[in-house]
Protein backbone atom coordinates (compact mmCIF):
# COMPACT_ATOMS: atom_id res chain seq x y z
CA UNK A 1 0.00 0.00 0.00
CA UNK A 2 1.56 3.31 -1.12
CA UNK A 3 2.09 6.05 1.49
CA UNK A 4 1.05 9.63 0.73
CA UNK A 5 3.49 10.86 -1.89
CA UNK A 6 4.81 13.70 0.27
CA UNK A 7 5.55 11.35 3.20
CA UNK A 8 7.28 9.00 0.77
CA UNK A 9 9.40 11.78 -0.79
CA UNK A 10 10.37 13.16 2.64
CA UNK A 11 11.42 9.74 3.86
CA UNK A 12 13.31 8.99 0.63
CA UNK A 13 15.20 12.29 0.85
CA UNK A 14 16.07 11.75 4.52
CA UNK A 15 17.57 8.32 3.76
CA UNK A 16 19.28 9.64 0.64
CA UNK A 17 20.80 12.60 2.51
CA UNK A 18 22.18 10.25 5.21
CA UNK A 19 23.67 7.81 2.67
CA UNK A 20 25.32 10.62 0.71
CA UNK A 21 26.24 12.97 3.55
CA UNK A 22 29.67 13.62 2.00
CA UNK A 23 28.25 14.45 -1.45
CA UNK A 24 26.45 17.81 -1.10
CA UNK A 25 26.05 18.63 -4.82
CA UNK A 26 24.57 15.21 -5.55
CA UNK A 27 22.12 15.53 -2.63
CA UNK A 28 21.15 19.04 -3.81
CA UNK A 29 20.29 17.84 -7.31
CA UNK A 30 18.29 14.82 -6.11
CA UNK A 31 16.42 17.02 -3.63
CA UNK A 32 15.60 19.50 -6.41
CA UNK A 33 14.07 16.81 -8.63
CA UNK A 34 12.34 14.68 -5.98
CA UNK A 35 10.97 17.74 -4.17
CA UNK A 36 8.86 18.73 -7.15
CA UNK A 37 7.41 15.30 -8.01
CA UNK A 38 4.58 15.26 -5.46
CA UNK A 39 1.80 15.82 -8.00
CA UNK A 40 3.15 13.22 -10.44
CA UNK A 41 3.59 10.58 -7.74
CA UNK A 42 0.01 11.22 -6.52
CA UNK A 43 -1.18 10.33 -10.00
CA UNK A 44 1.17 7.35 -10.33
CA UNK A 45 1.31 5.33 -7.09
CA UNK A 46 2.90 2.52 -9.13
CA UNK A 47 6.13 4.56 -9.28
CA UNK A 48 6.39 4.35 -5.50
CA UNK A 49 5.66 0.61 -5.48
CA UNK A 50 8.34 0.02 -8.12
CA UNK A 51 10.92 2.12 -6.18
CA UNK A 52 11.58 4.28 -9.25
CA UNK A 53 13.10 7.15 -7.23
CA UNK A 54 15.40 4.83 -5.27
CA UNK A 55 16.57 3.09 -8.44
CA UNK A 56 17.02 6.17 -10.62
CA UNK A 57 19.14 7.94 -7.98
CA UNK A 58 21.68 5.07 -7.90
CA UNK A 59 24.14 5.19 -10.84
CA UNK A 60 24.25 2.01 -12.91
CA UNK A 61 28.04 2.22 -12.81
CA UNK A 62 30.70 4.61 -11.49
CA UNK A 63 34.18 4.21 -12.92
CA UNK A 64 37.22 5.86 -11.31
CA UNK A 65 40.70 5.60 -12.74
CA UNK A 66 44.25 6.90 -12.53
CA UNK A 67 45.50 9.27 -15.23
CA UNK A 68 49.31 9.40 -15.30
CA UNK A 69 51.05 11.78 -17.71
CA UNK A 70 54.29 13.72 -18.03
CA UNK A 71 54.52 17.52 -17.97
CA UNK A 72 56.86 19.62 -20.13
CA UNK A 73 59.55 19.51 -17.44
CA UNK A 74 59.52 15.70 -17.57
CA UNK A 75 57.82 15.40 -14.16
CA UNK A 76 55.20 12.67 -13.70
CA UNK A 77 51.73 14.01 -12.89
CA UNK A 78 48.77 12.05 -11.54
CA UNK A 79 45.11 13.01 -11.88
CA UNK A 80 41.90 11.22 -11.04
CA UNK A 81 39.51 10.40 -13.89
CA UNK A 82 35.87 9.36 -13.65
CA UNK A 83 32.84 8.32 -15.66
CA UNK A 84 29.41 8.05 -14.04
CA UNK A 85 27.22 5.87 -16.27
CA UNK A 86 24.00 6.83 -14.59
CA UNK A 87 21.14 5.50 -16.68
CA UNK A 88 20.85 3.60 -19.97
CA UNK A 89 17.03 3.47 -19.90
CA UNK A 90 16.52 5.76 -22.88
CA UNK A 91 19.64 5.05 -24.95
CA UNK A 92 23.45 4.87 -24.80
CA UNK A 93 24.96 6.76 -21.85
CA UNK A 94 25.38 10.39 -22.91
CA UNK A 95 26.87 13.42 -21.18
CA UNK A 96 29.92 15.64 -21.15
CA UNK A 97 33.43 15.43 -19.71
CA UNK A 98 34.58 18.17 -17.36
CA UNK A 99 38.25 18.99 -16.68
CA UNK A 100 38.42 21.25 -13.61
CA UNK A 101 40.13 21.00 -10.20
CA UNK A 102 36.72 20.93 -8.48
CA UNK A 103 35.71 17.66 -10.18
CA UNK A 104 34.89 14.85 -7.75
CA UNK A 105 32.32 12.06 -7.35
CA UNK A 106 29.69 14.36 -5.85
CA UNK A 107 29.88 16.92 -8.66
CA UNK A 108 29.81 14.25 -11.37
CA UNK A 109 26.91 12.36 -9.80
CA UNK A 110 24.91 15.60 -9.61
CA UNK A 111 25.69 16.34 -13.25
CA UNK A 112 24.94 12.75 -14.33
CA UNK A 113 21.65 12.73 -12.43
CA UNK A 114 20.56 16.03 -14.05
CA UNK A 115 21.60 14.67 -17.43
CA UNK A 116 19.13 11.75 -17.24
CA UNK A 117 16.13 14.08 -17.15
CA UNK A 118 17.58 16.66 -19.54
CA UNK A 119 18.20 13.94 -22.11
CA UNK A 120 14.73 12.57 -21.51
CA UNK A 121 13.22 16.01 -22.22
CA UNK A 122 14.91 16.18 -25.64
CA UNK A 123 12.72 13.27 -26.78
CA UNK A 124 15.82 11.58 -28.28
CA UNK A 125 17.20 8.12 -27.42
CA UNK A 126 19.83 9.19 -24.93
CA UNK A 127 20.78 7.73 -21.55
CA UNK A 128 22.43 9.86 -18.85
CA UNK A 129 26.12 10.10 -17.88
CA UNK A 130 28.88 12.52 -16.93
CA UNK A 131 32.62 12.26 -16.48
CA UNK A 132 35.86 14.14 -16.27
CA UNK A 133 38.97 14.67 -14.20
CA UNK A 134 40.39 16.97 -11.54
CA UNK A 135 42.83 18.27 -14.17
CA UNK A 136 43.18 22.03 -14.69
CA UNK A 137 43.88 22.91 -18.34
CA UNK A 138 44.58 26.53 -17.31
CA UNK A 139 48.24 27.41 -17.67
CA UNK A 140 49.12 24.10 -19.35
CA UNK A 141 50.88 24.03 -22.70
CA UNK A 142 49.18 22.58 -25.73
CA UNK A 143 51.48 19.56 -25.59
CA UNK A 144 50.62 18.96 -21.92
CA UNK A 145 46.90 19.14 -22.65
CA UNK A 146 47.39 16.66 -25.50
CA UNK A 147 49.32 14.19 -23.34
CA UNK A 148 46.74 14.45 -20.58
CA UNK A 149 43.82 13.91 -23.01
CA UNK A 150 45.57 10.88 -24.51
CA UNK A 151 46.22 9.34 -21.10
CA UNK A 152 42.64 10.03 -19.97
CA UNK A 153 40.92 8.54 -23.03
CA UNK A 154 43.26 5.53 -23.13
CA UNK A 155 41.67 4.39 -19.87
CA UNK A 156 38.11 5.54 -20.67
CA UNK A 157 38.25 3.83 -24.09
CA UNK A 158 37.52 0.53 -22.34
CA UNK A 159 34.04 1.77 -21.40
CA UNK A 160 32.76 3.86 -24.32
CA UNK A 161 31.53 3.24 -27.87
CA UNK A 162 28.87 4.54 -30.28
CA UNK A 163 26.18 2.23 -28.88
CA UNK A 164 27.51 2.14 -25.30
CA UNK A 165 28.51 5.55 -24.01
CA UNK A 166 29.20 8.70 -26.03
CA UNK A 167 30.96 11.50 -24.07
CA UNK A 168 31.09 15.17 -25.16
CA UNK A 169 32.60 18.42 -23.84
CA UNK A 170 31.81 20.50 -20.74
CA UNK A 171 33.82 22.96 -18.62
CA UNK A 172 37.48 22.77 -19.67
CA UNK A 173 36.73 20.41 -22.56
CA UNK A 174 36.23 22.17 -25.88
CA UNK A 175 37.04 21.34 -29.49
CA UNK A 176 40.80 21.12 -28.81
CA UNK A 177 40.39 18.50 -26.07
CA UNK A 178 37.73 16.53 -28.01
CA UNK A 179 40.13 16.47 -31.00
CA UNK A 180 43.00 15.03 -28.95
CA UNK A 181 40.75 12.46 -27.29
CA UNK A 182 39.12 11.43 -30.57
CA UNK A 183 42.51 10.99 -32.28
CA UNK A 184 43.79 8.70 -29.54
CA UNK A 185 40.50 6.80 -29.26
CA UNK A 186 40.44 6.15 -33.00
CA UNK A 187 43.99 4.82 -32.85
CA UNK A 188 43.07 2.43 -30.02
CA UNK A 189 39.76 1.31 -31.52
CA UNK A 190 41.14 0.98 -35.04
CA UNK A 191 37.82 2.33 -36.29
CA UNK A 192 36.37 5.73 -37.17
CA UNK A 193 33.00 6.05 -35.49
CA UNK A 194 30.99 8.42 -33.35
CA UNK A 195 32.21 7.58 -29.84
CA UNK A 196 32.57 11.24 -28.91
CA UNK A 197 30.45 14.22 -29.93
CA UNK A 198 31.58 17.80 -30.39
CA UNK A 199 33.96 16.61 -33.13
CA UNK A 200 35.25 19.03 -35.76
CA UNK A 201 32.77 19.65 -38.52
CA UNK A 202 35.25 18.35 -41.13
CA UNK A 203 35.81 15.03 -39.32
CA UNK A 204 32.45 13.70 -38.16
CA UNK A 205 31.07 16.64 -36.19
CA UNK A 206 27.66 18.23 -36.57
CA UNK A 207 27.07 21.70 -37.86
CA UNK A 208 25.95 23.97 -34.99
CA UNK A 209 27.23 21.74 -32.12
CA UNK A 210 29.49 24.50 -30.69
CA UNK A 211 26.61 26.99 -30.83
CA UNK A 212 23.88 24.58 -29.69
CA UNK A 213 23.72 25.12 -25.91
CA UNK A 214 23.82 28.92 -26.08
CA UNK A 215 21.48 29.14 -29.07
CA UNK A 216 19.10 26.62 -27.51
CA UNK A 217 19.04 28.64 -24.29
CA UNK A 218 17.99 31.76 -26.15
CA UNK A 219 15.34 29.82 -28.13
CA UNK A 220 13.97 28.62 -24.80
CA UNK A 221 13.92 32.17 -23.42
CA UNK A 222 12.12 33.35 -26.56
CA UNK A 223 9.49 30.65 -25.99
CA UNK A 224 9.08 31.78 -22.36
CA UNK A 225 8.63 35.38 -23.52
CA UNK A 226 6.23 34.34 -26.26
CA UNK A 227 4.01 32.78 -23.55
CA UNK A 228 3.44 36.35 -22.37
CA UNK A 229 3.22 37.84 -25.89
CA UNK A 230 6.65 39.37 -25.60
CA UNK A 231 10.06 38.85 -27.27
CA UNK A 232 13.77 39.47 -26.70
CA UNK A 233 13.83 42.32 -29.17
CA UNK A 234 14.89 45.48 -27.32
CA UNK A 235 15.57 43.71 -24.01
CA UNK A 236 18.77 43.92 -21.95
CA UNK A 237 20.55 40.69 -21.06
CA UNK A 238 23.17 39.99 -18.36
CA UNK A 239 25.24 36.87 -18.96
CA UNK A 240 27.73 35.21 -16.62
CA UNK A 241 30.64 33.15 -17.95
CA UNK A 242 32.68 33.73 -21.08
CA UNK A 243 33.03 30.14 -22.26
CA UNK A 244 31.23 28.11 -24.87
CA UNK A 245 27.68 28.49 -23.52
CA UNK A 246 28.02 32.19 -22.64
CA UNK A 247 29.57 33.14 -26.01
CA UNK A 248 26.85 31.61 -28.15
CA UNK A 249 24.04 32.73 -25.83
CA UNK A 250 25.38 36.25 -26.35
CA UNK A 251 25.58 35.78 -30.12
CA UNK A 252 22.00 34.52 -30.44
CA UNK A 253 20.66 37.19 -28.04
CA UNK A 254 22.24 39.84 -30.29
CA UNK A 255 20.66 38.23 -33.37
CA UNK A 256 17.28 38.42 -31.62
CA UNK A 257 17.67 42.18 -31.11
CA UNK A 258 18.73 42.20 -27.44
CA UNK A 259 21.53 44.23 -25.84
CA UNK A 260 24.11 42.15 -23.97
CA UNK A 261 25.53 44.06 -20.99
CA UNK A 262 27.84 41.64 -19.19
CA UNK A 263 30.06 38.59 -19.41
CA UNK A 264 32.37 37.19 -16.72
CA UNK A 265 34.95 34.62 -15.68
CA UNK A 266 36.19 33.47 -12.30
CA UNK A 267 38.12 36.76 -11.89
CA UNK A 268 35.11 39.07 -12.23
CA UNK A 269 32.58 40.69 -14.56
CA UNK A 270 32.83 43.11 -17.44
CA UNK A 271 29.91 45.53 -17.69
CA UNK A 272 29.61 47.44 -20.96
CA UNK A 273 26.85 50.02 -20.71
CA UNK A 274 26.93 50.48 -24.51
CA UNK A 275 26.40 46.77 -24.99
CA UNK A 276 28.70 43.98 -26.17
CA UNK A 277 28.00 44.11 -29.90
CA UNK A 278 29.04 41.56 -32.54
CA UNK A 279 32.47 43.05 -33.08
CA UNK A 280 33.21 43.13 -29.34
CA UNK A 281 31.92 39.57 -29.00
CA UNK A 282 34.34 38.46 -31.73
CA UNK A 283 37.13 39.98 -29.65
CA UNK A 284 35.96 37.99 -26.57
CA UNK A 285 35.80 34.77 -28.60
CA UNK A 286 39.35 35.25 -29.85
CA UNK A 287 40.54 36.26 -26.38
CA UNK A 288 39.00 33.23 -24.63
CA UNK A 289 39.28 30.53 -27.31
CA UNK A 290 42.53 31.26 -29.14
CA UNK A 291 44.57 33.34 -26.71
CA UNK A 292 43.12 31.74 -23.55
CA UNK A 293 43.13 35.18 -21.93
CA UNK A 294 41.14 36.71 -19.07
CA UNK A 295 37.90 38.70 -19.39
CA UNK A 296 39.38 41.72 -17.58
CA UNK A 297 41.38 42.47 -20.77
CA UNK A 298 38.12 43.53 -22.42
CA UNK A 299 37.92 46.57 -20.14
CA UNK A 300 41.44 47.61 -21.19
CA UNK A 301 40.41 47.50 -24.84
CA UNK A 302 36.94 49.10 -24.64
CA UNK A 303 36.65 52.24 -22.53
CA UNK A 304 32.84 51.94 -22.40
CA UNK A 305 33.38 48.92 -20.17
CA UNK A 306 34.11 48.54 -16.51
CA UNK A 307 35.71 45.47 -14.87
CA UNK A 308 34.09 44.48 -11.58
CA UNK A 309 36.79 42.47 -9.82
CA UNK A 310 35.50 39.41 -7.97
CA UNK A 311 31.86 40.22 -8.78
CA UNK A 312 29.15 38.32 -10.62
CA UNK A 313 26.76 40.19 -12.97
CA UNK A 314 23.72 40.13 -10.62
CA UNK A 315 24.18 43.74 -9.50
CA UNK A 316 23.75 45.04 -13.06
CA UNK A 317 20.18 45.96 -14.06
CA UNK A 318 18.81 43.82 -16.91
CA UNK A 319 15.55 42.34 -18.19
CA UNK A 320 16.93 38.83 -18.58
CA UNK A 321 19.69 37.04 -16.63
CA UNK A 322 21.48 34.02 -18.07
CA UNK A 323 23.87 32.30 -15.62
CA UNK A 324 26.21 30.39 -17.97
CA UNK A 325 29.36 29.70 -15.89
CA UNK A 326 29.10 27.01 -13.21
CA UNK A 327 27.09 25.43 -10.40
CA UNK A 328 25.90 27.50 -7.44
CA UNK A 329 27.15 30.80 -8.90
CA UNK A 330 23.82 32.56 -8.21
CA UNK A 331 23.39 32.37 -4.44
CA UNK A 332 20.84 33.93 -2.09
CA UNK A 333 22.71 37.24 -1.78
CA UNK A 334 23.06 37.41 -5.58
CA UNK A 335 19.37 36.67 -6.07
CA UNK A 336 18.45 39.44 -3.62
CA UNK A 337 20.61 41.86 -5.63
CA UNK A 338 19.03 40.69 -8.87
CA UNK A 339 15.32 40.87 -7.89
CA UNK A 340 15.68 44.57 -7.09
CA UNK A 341 15.93 45.10 -10.87
CA UNK A 342 12.55 43.40 -11.43
CA UNK A 343 13.69 41.25 -14.38
CA UNK A 344 11.32 39.20 -16.50
CA UNK A 345 13.33 36.00 -16.68
CA UNK A 346 16.24 34.09 -15.21
CA UNK A 347 17.19 31.08 -17.35
CA UNK A 348 20.05 28.69 -16.63
CA UNK A 349 22.70 28.09 -19.30
CA UNK A 350 24.98 26.36 -16.79
CA UNK A 351 24.03 23.26 -14.83
CA UNK A 352 22.49 24.09 -11.42
CA UNK A 353 23.96 27.63 -11.23
CA UNK A 354 21.13 28.70 -8.90
CA UNK A 355 21.26 27.59 -5.26
CA UNK A 356 17.98 26.39 -3.67
CA UNK A 357 17.94 29.52 -1.45
CA UNK A 358 18.39 31.81 -4.48
CA UNK A 359 15.62 29.96 -6.32
CA UNK A 360 13.24 30.64 -3.41
CA UNK A 361 14.07 34.37 -3.61
CA UNK A 362 13.32 34.43 -7.36
CA UNK A 363 10.15 32.41 -6.90
CA UNK A 364 8.83 34.71 -4.19
CA UNK A 365 9.56 37.71 -6.42
CA UNK A 366 7.48 36.09 -9.18
CA UNK A 367 10.31 35.94 -11.72
CA UNK A 368 9.90 33.34 -14.47
CA UNK A 369 12.69 30.78 -14.06
CA UNK A 370 14.02 28.40 -16.73
CA UNK A 371 15.82 25.44 -15.10
CA UNK A 372 18.98 24.18 -16.81
CA UNK A 373 17.74 20.71 -17.52
CA UNK A 374 15.21 22.29 -19.87
CA UNK A 375 16.82 25.55 -20.94
CA UNK A 376 20.34 24.26 -21.64
CA UNK A 377 19.30 20.96 -23.26
CA UNK A 378 20.16 22.26 -26.75
CA UNK A 379 23.78 21.10 -26.47
CA UNK A 380 23.01 17.49 -25.77
CA UNK A 381 20.17 17.60 -28.29
CA UNK A 382 22.57 18.51 -31.10
CA UNK A 383 25.01 15.90 -29.74
CA UNK A 384 22.14 13.44 -30.23
CA UNK A 385 21.74 14.74 -33.78
CA UNK A 386 25.51 14.30 -34.28
CA UNK A 387 25.14 10.63 -33.25
CA UNK A 388 22.32 10.18 -35.77
CA UNK A 389 24.42 11.76 -38.53
CA UNK A 390 27.42 9.55 -37.62
CA UNK A 391 25.29 6.39 -37.70
CA UNK A 392 24.10 7.19 -41.20
CA UNK A 393 27.44 8.75 -42.32
CA UNK A 394 25.74 11.93 -43.46
CA UNK A 395 25.99 15.58 -42.54
CA UNK A 396 23.01 17.89 -42.27
CA UNK A 397 23.27 21.56 -43.20
CA UNK A 398 23.57 24.35 -40.65
CA UNK A 399 19.99 25.41 -41.45
CA UNK A 400 18.66 21.89 -41.09
CA UNK A 401 20.27 21.38 -37.66
CA UNK A 402 19.13 24.85 -36.54
CA UNK A 403 15.56 24.06 -37.51
CA UNK A 404 15.67 20.77 -35.56
CA UNK A 405 17.23 22.53 -32.55
CA UNK A 406 14.51 25.20 -32.53
CA UNK A 407 11.83 22.56 -32.78
CA UNK A 408 13.36 20.52 -29.89
CA UNK A 409 13.61 23.61 -27.64
CA UNK A 410 10.02 24.61 -28.42
CA UNK A 411 8.92 21.06 -27.69
CA UNK A 412 10.75 21.06 -24.34
CA UNK A 413 9.11 24.38 -23.51
CA UNK A 414 5.69 22.94 -24.37
CA UNK A 415 6.34 19.94 -22.07
CA UNK A 416 7.27 22.31 -19.21
CA UNK A 417 4.01 24.20 -19.73
CA UNK A 418 1.96 21.01 -20.00
CA UNK A 419 3.31 19.56 -16.74
CA UNK A 420 3.96 22.83 -14.91
CA UNK A 421 0.95 25.08 -15.49
CA UNK A 422 -1.12 25.68 -12.37
CA UNK A 423 -4.78 26.73 -11.94
CA UNK A 424 -3.88 30.42 -12.17
CA UNK A 425 -2.38 29.85 -15.63
CA UNK A 426 1.20 30.46 -14.45
CA UNK A 427 3.88 27.91 -15.37
CA UNK A 428 6.25 26.48 -12.78
CA UNK A 429 9.05 25.49 -15.17
CA UNK A 430 10.97 23.61 -12.47
CA UNK A 431 8.02 21.36 -11.67
CA UNK A 432 7.14 21.01 -15.35
CA UNK A 433 10.65 20.03 -16.45
CA UNK A 434 11.16 17.59 -13.58
CA UNK A 435 7.77 15.91 -14.00
CA UNK A 436 8.00 15.62 -17.80
CA UNK A 437 11.61 14.36 -17.72
CA UNK A 438 10.94 11.95 -14.88
CA UNK A 439 7.78 10.46 -16.34
CA UNK A 440 9.45 9.23 -19.55
CA UNK A 441 12.23 7.65 -17.49
CA UNK A 442 9.80 6.08 -15.01
CA UNK A 443 7.67 4.54 -17.76
CA UNK A 444 10.79 3.06 -19.38
CA UNK A 445 11.87 1.65 -16.03
CA UNK A 446 8.49 0.00 -15.50
CA UNK A 447 8.56 -1.48 -19.01
CA UNK A 448 12.14 -2.76 -18.80
CA UNK A 449 11.70 -4.67 -15.53
CA UNK A 450 13.93 -4.90 -12.48
CA UNK A 451 17.45 -4.95 -13.93
P1 LIG B 1 33.69 26.61 -20.55
O1 LIG B 1 34.83 25.91 -19.92
O2 LIG B 1 33.72 26.89 -22.00
O3 LIG B 1 33.41 28.00 -19.80
C1 LIG B 1 33.18 28.05 -18.44
C2 LIG B 1 33.07 29.50 -18.03
O4 LIG B 1 32.64 29.56 -16.67
C3 LIG B 1 34.39 30.25 -18.08
O5 LIG B 1 34.15 31.59 -18.39
C4 LIG B 1 34.90 30.10 -16.64
O6 LIG B 1 35.80 31.11 -16.24
C5 LIG B 1 33.62 30.24 -15.88
N1 LIG B 1 33.75 29.57 -14.57
C6 LIG B 1 34.08 28.29 -14.33
N2 LIG B 1 34.13 28.04 -13.01
C7 LIG B 1 33.83 29.22 -12.42
C8 LIG B 1 33.71 29.64 -11.07
N3 LIG B 1 33.93 28.78 -10.05
N4 LIG B 1 33.36 30.93 -10.83
C9 LIG B 1 33.13 31.80 -11.85
N5 LIG B 1 33.25 31.46 -13.14
C10 LIG B 1 33.57 30.20 -13.42
O7 LIG B 1 32.38 25.73 -20.16
P2 LIG B 1 30.97 25.69 -20.85
O8 LIG B 1 30.60 27.04 -21.35
O9 LIG B 1 30.94 24.54 -21.77
O10 LIG B 1 30.04 25.29 -19.63
C11 LIG B 1 29.48 26.27 -18.75
C12 LIG B 1 28.33 25.65 -17.97
O11 LIG B 1 27.33 25.17 -18.90
C13 LIG B 1 28.68 24.45 -17.11
O12 LIG B 1 27.85 24.43 -15.98
C14 LIG B 1 28.32 23.28 -18.02
O13 LIG B 1 28.06 22.11 -17.27
C15 LIG B 1 27.05 23.82 -18.66
N6 LIG B 1 26.66 23.17 -19.90
C16 LIG B 1 27.52 23.12 -20.96
C17 LIG B 1 27.12 22.53 -22.13
C18 LIG B 1 27.98 22.55 -23.35
O14 LIG B 1 27.49 22.13 -24.41
N7 LIG B 1 29.21 23.03 -23.29
C19 LIG B 1 25.81 21.86 -22.25
C20 LIG B 1 24.94 22.07 -21.12
C21 LIG B 1 25.39 22.68 -19.98
P3 LIG B 1 37.35 30.76 -15.96
O15 LIG B 1 37.99 30.78 -17.32
O16 LIG B 1 37.81 31.84 -15.08
O17 LIG B 1 37.38 29.40 -15.31
Image (cartoon, rainbow, N blue to C red):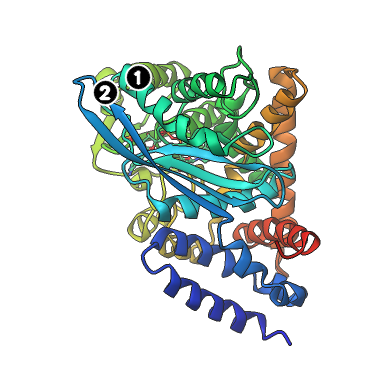
**The disc label shown at residue 393, or none:** none
Q: Is residue 123 left or right of residue 175?
A: right
Q: Quadrant of residue 52?
A: bottom right
| 10 Å crowding of disc 1: few (<14), some (14-19), many (20+) | some
Please tell me which residue is depicted at 47% across the width and 30% down the height of the picture: 153
| Residue 376: percent from left, percent from top | 57, 42
Look at the image and tell me in which quarter the C terminus lies. bottom right
Q: Quadrant of residue 339?
A: bottom left
Q: Report the front residue among 312 and 79.
A: 79
Q: Residue furthest right?
A: 447
Q: What residue did someone put label 2 on?
A: 297
Q: Is residue 245 above or below residue 24?
A: above
Badge 1 vs badge 2, beta-carbon distance below 8 Å: yes
Ligand 1 shown in quarter: top left
| 10 Å crowding of disc 2: few (<14), some (14-19), many (20+) | few
| Residue 318: percent from left, percent from top | 44, 43
**Mark positioned earlier in the residue sequence (1 or 2):** 1
Q: Is residue 43 above or below residue 116?
A: below
| Residue 211: percent from left, percent from top | 57, 27
Q: Report the front residue among 264 and 205.
A: 205
Q: Report the front residue among 39 and 85.
A: 85
| Residue 314: percent from left, percent from top | 37, 47
Q: What residue did someone put label 1 on?
A: 287
Mark 1 vs mark 2, foreground winner is 1
Amino acid sequence: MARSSQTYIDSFLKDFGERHAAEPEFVQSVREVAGSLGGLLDKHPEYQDAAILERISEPERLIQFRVAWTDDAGKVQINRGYRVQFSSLLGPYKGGLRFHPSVNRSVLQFLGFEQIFKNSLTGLWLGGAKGGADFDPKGKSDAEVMRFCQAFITELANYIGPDTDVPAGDIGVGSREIGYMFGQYKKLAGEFHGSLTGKGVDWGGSNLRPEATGYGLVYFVEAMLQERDDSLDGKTVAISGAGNVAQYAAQKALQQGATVLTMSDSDGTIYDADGIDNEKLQYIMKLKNAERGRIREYANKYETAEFKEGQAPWGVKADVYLPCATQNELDEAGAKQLVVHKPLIVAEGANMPTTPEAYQVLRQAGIAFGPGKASNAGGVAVSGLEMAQNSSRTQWSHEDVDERLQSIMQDIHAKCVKYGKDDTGATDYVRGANAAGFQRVAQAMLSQGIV
